[in-house]
Amino acid sequence: MNILVLGSGGREHTFAYKIAQSDLCDSLFVAPGNAGTATIATNVPIAVTDFHTIKELVIEKNIKMVVVGPEDPLVKGISDFFKNDSELKDIVVIGPSKEGAQLEGSKEYAKEFLFRHNIPTAAYQSFTTETIEEGKKFLETLTSPYVLKADGLAAGKGVLILQDIDEAKAELENMLTNKKFGAASEKVVIEEFLDGIELSVFVLTDGKNYLTLPTAKDYKRIGEGDTGLNTGGMGAISPVPFADHTLMTKIEERIIKPTVEGLAKENIDYKGFIFIGLIKVGDDPKVIEYNVRMGDPETEVVLPRVKTDLVQLFQHVGNQSLSKINLELDQRSAATIVTVSGGYPETYEKGKEITGIDTIIDSIVFHAGTSLENGKVVTSGGRVLAITSFDEDFRKALKISYQNIEKLNFDKMYYRKDLGFDL
Ligand code: AMP
Ligand code: GLY
């Protein structure tokens, strides 16, 4: 079978890496891909939201399965585009319908879904420019810190956590009236602050059945000790050491099952990943957010631990027969560390030559922001490489990745040296 992966980050390199290992895969294409995917697949320079050109490629190359990496094409309805096209309707698309993708595309939609299905989450109310004064009054009923969320997609930047009530009111004004996050903040969700430790669970569902994939924890802040600006993610480990059997049973019963059942009950077409951001408050898990895709860099630790053939899993998603699968996992821990361009997540330079990748043998180097220029691998994004290692002990896995990063070099390379510090 010929397969297409959409996206160009570390997540998509990891998908391509696993798919390329499958006997079920004949030709693998990645659009647009990066220098890493170019070594195992054919990169095609098509944007992930250019559905018409994607269709042309799918037909020309006889592609039978499309794996959607990022949320953007999902929220824009790529699954529906395939389903409603007579030439594309039988192609397996891994990624939910436009309606299902609203779980990530709108914070308010997600909160309403959570409440409809009695899934534990923070109390909230949502506001628009018309109800800004009520929003300020609602803030007064809460205690510091205050959580303000732009309703729509804001490239991971739409959540503000503020200590001071006046600052919270000013930011509410800024988001609604001044459209701080553009159209994404035409509506703002104000939430109760939840105090606890975060983890993520990943679910693969065919709309009826589901498999719980390994848990992971990522490190979002740029600075050591979880300080500074938020990034897409500076590293991750899997499994999460504190996600024991008791906690996982609660997560499964109170969160995963009602989520999948809720989607089915509401006839929401959902074949793909659900990435559930959780916070453990005391002994109880609560949902912070849904994403309708895998995480990045979480994918770089979750998928390498899945031993079951990924293409086979996806075929079962397509046929709604996931219940037939017994998921086989590597019981070792995996850790990944992301090297980034100096300056990220603010402005940074691109086009820096990367050396040392070929010298690494006991870690997997997943490319994120890289491209090929005159046969050389150069930086082309903020997050550049993710270095994944395994060991029985996650601390040792981290150590192996750290040792291997020493062999890598590009101008102004930066990475956090403290991953796992909080565990
Ligand atoms: P989100 O984009 O919804 O994942 O939010 C980004 C980050 O903000 C999360 O990873 C949490 O660290 C934090 N956060 C979001 N909602 C809350 C909340 N209700 N209480 C505490 N922290 C939160
Ligand atoms: N690492 C967080 C995300 O993928 O949303």
Image (cartoon, helix red, strand yellow):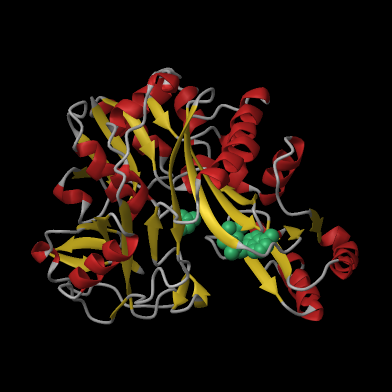
Q: Quadrant of residue 319?
A: top left
Q: Is residue 32 visible?
A: no
Instruction: Tell whether 48 sits left or right of 40.
Output: right
Q: Quadrant of residue 154?
A: bottom right
Q: Is residue 323 visible?
A: yes
Instruction: Tell whether 257 sits left or right of 338.
Output: right
Q: Position of residue 363 (x, y in %)?
A: 19, 59
Instruction: Tell whether 392 sits left or right of 222.
Output: left
Q: Position of residue 341 (x, y in %)?
A: 32, 75
Asked whether 253 or 53 is in front, the reply is 253
Instruction: Tell whether 169 sits left or right of 310.
Output: right
Compared to residue 103, the image places residue 391 above or below, namely below
Compared to residue 228, the image places residue 159 above or below, namely above
Q: Quadrant of the N terminus?
A: top left
Compared to residue 371, the image places residue 266 above or below, namely above
Q: Position of residue 116 (x, y in %)?
A: 76, 36
